[in-house]
Image (cartoon, rainbow, N blue to C red):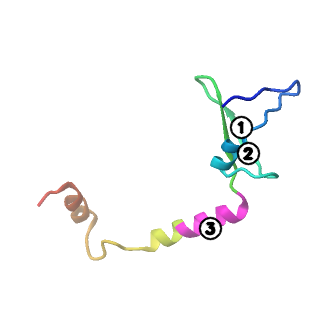
Amino acid sequence: MSTKVTVKGQVTLPKAVREAAGIRPGDRVSVRARPEGGVLVEREANAREQSDFRRTLTAMARRRPFKGFSTEEVMKLTRGEE
């Protein structure tokens, strides 16, 4: 897909791109130039999404899937060592 840049430097993101990225009217986006050329446009997460993400990470950190095992024992299990 391609689009034109206006005299003001504005670009309209095609509908398919907006939908794929979850970008809706009023959303903020982050725009960065890539060192090898090109531009990266990403939807910024809102405060609620960030809060939900932190809560998920905190819940994951509290889980103890290998309760009763030392770090060394878990490492041996993951490496297939006996």
Identify the image quadrant of residue 70.
bottom left
Q: Residue 31 carries which label?
A: 1
Relative to the observer, which residue lies in front, 53 or 42? Answer: 42
Compute the Cα span from label 1 to label 3.
24 Å
Residue at 74% from the left image edge and 38% from the top image edge? 13
Q: Kindly check if marks 1 and 3 are in contact, taking CB atoms under 8 A apart as contact.
A: no
| Mark closer to the chain start, 1 or 3 | 1
Where does the magenta region start and end?
46-56
Compute the Cα span from label 2 to label 3.
19 Å
Q: Which amino acid does label 1 sit on?
A: Val
Residue at 65% from the left image edge and 48% from the top image edge? 21
Relative to the observer, which residue lies in front, 23 or 65? Answer: 23
Residue at 62% from the left image edge and 67% from the top image edge? 52
**Which quadrant is home to the C terminus?**
bottom left
Looking at the magenta stretch, what is its main secondary structure? helix
Q: Which amino acid does label 2 sit on?
A: Val
Circle 1: element type: strand
- Name above or below for residue 68 compared with residue 15: below
Relative to the observer, which residue lies in front, 46 or 72? Answer: 46
Identify the image quadrant of residue 49.
bottom right
Q: Is residue 66 left or right of residue 30?
A: left
Circle 3: element type: helix
Residue marked by disc 2? 29
Residue 4 placed where, x, y %? 78, 26
Q: Is residue 82 left or right of residue 73?
A: left
